[in-house]
Image: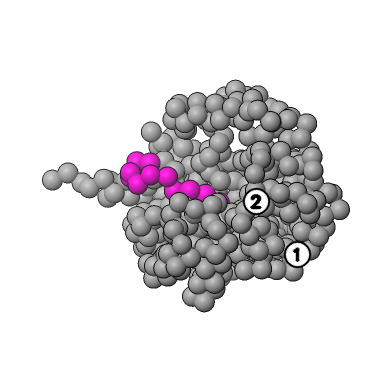
Amino acid sequence: MPMPKRSLISLVLVLLFAQANAESLAIVNVNVVPMTSETVLRGQTVLIEGETIAAIGDVDAVAVAEGVEVIDGTDRYLMPGLFEMHGHVTGTEDAEIERLFNLFLANGVTSVRGMLGRPAHLTLRADIEAGAVLGPRLITSGPSLNGNSVESAEAGRRMAREQHEAGYDFLKIHPGLSSDEFNAIADTANELGIPFAGHVPVSVGLEGALAKGIATIDHLDGYMAAMLPANVDTSGGYGGFFGVMLADQVIDAKLDDVVAATVAAGVANVPTESLFEQLVNATPAVEYGSQPEMRYMPEGTVSQWVNAKEQTLSERGFDPAVAARAIDIRRRLISALHEAGGVLLLGSDAPQIFNVPGFSLHNELEFMVAAGLTPYEALRTGTVAPAEFLGIDAGSVEVGRIADLVLLDDDPLAAIDNSRRVHGVFVRGRWALAEDLLSAIR
């Protein structure tokens, strides 16, 4: 009798994770980047028992029991696993899920917040939690709530209740909702205690979304419009991709106002700056399309991405100088949110235009540094901050934390692009080499 597809894929992943059934591991003589402070603890031994970090100490002081699997950490750096806070689980085919998970894990991504959920994701989430599927932790929204799927305020309330009852982690807000529909969804979500997150409907604007307690604003959606003169009507005309063509009308003095309002509301932001800049900047589309990681994506998908950028740059009304100003405004907004104590969460919107899962999160880290954050500050947006935001006992290298960890070949605090140099990954204590995960992709 042939083995079911899901079982076969699970077996492949278990074989890749050499320690899938091990009870203990020791990472010996490793440099620990705990992310609790901007420091490196050199020459450490880290013991993992089951899914948990059991001990951390000087290599000469921590004994490793006989029979414990030892991983040599010499000249390598151990940091927490990364959170992709705006990702997508595309498709339902087992082979597609395996490819997606291998890409995330090989790049040190141990948790993914899925921003466009479907019923199958509830089963997949349970399979991951049970260990039947080895992949990054999945935090999933329900199906999109948008101008097409929601027909009325009452329908919005009903759909919010249904998604809460189904067990989704949060509600996904997409464009097109009327103010009545958005407010009905938001009020119902707040009553039920389920977060809602995503886009800012034009009908309510940034102020309305903040007032209702949206959990995260993704893509910095709504901010460009919120910084326009009061008499500008943004309901029509060409605003472009997340308001890119509105940048020439933005009043710079309003930036501090929207930052202050965001921080006061306690709303987090997932900028997805890599998605925005790669689409509207002046870099030729073919240059992005020829990046090495594109070999892990179908040729047709890469061609679509190249075409999307070329069409954007050639679209009537698109002005490269205004787009460059939009990039500058967004970078200053990211920096100002950070400096004011706002919550920034790392997310790239993978797999979307030029954002290959896993690889794109390292692009996002580099864009965060380009916006003014230090490597340490940028890394916190993908480790400590999302773990705290989601209430997950991970995000740092500390005794008692979940062993979602990444072993790097160089120091990520010294240069942010060192985050790309993934040697291997620990997912809830299970270990795999990055090269094995990538070589298994078909």
The amino acid type, in three-letter code, at marker 2 is Asp
Residue 331 is left or right of residue 214, and the answer is right
Q: Which residues are magenta?
A: 86-96
Task: Note whether residue 70 is visible.
Answer: no
The question of residue 91 being in magenta is answered with yes
Residue drawn 61% across and 57% down? 203
Quarter of the image that includes the C terminus: top left
| Mark toward the start of the polypeptide (2 vs 1) | 2
The question of residue 1 being in magenta is answered with no
The amino acid type, in three-letter code, at marker 1 is Ala
Q: CA distance from mark 2 to mark 1?
A: 15 Å
Quarter of the image that includes the N terminus: top left
Residue drawn 57% across and 34% down? 354
Quarter of the image holding residue 199? Answer: bottom right
Residue 287 is left or right of residue 170, and the answer is right
Residue position marked by numbered label 1 in the rendering:
261
Residue position marked by numbered label 2 in the rendering:
221
Picture coordinates of residue 173, whole percent (x, y): 53, 57
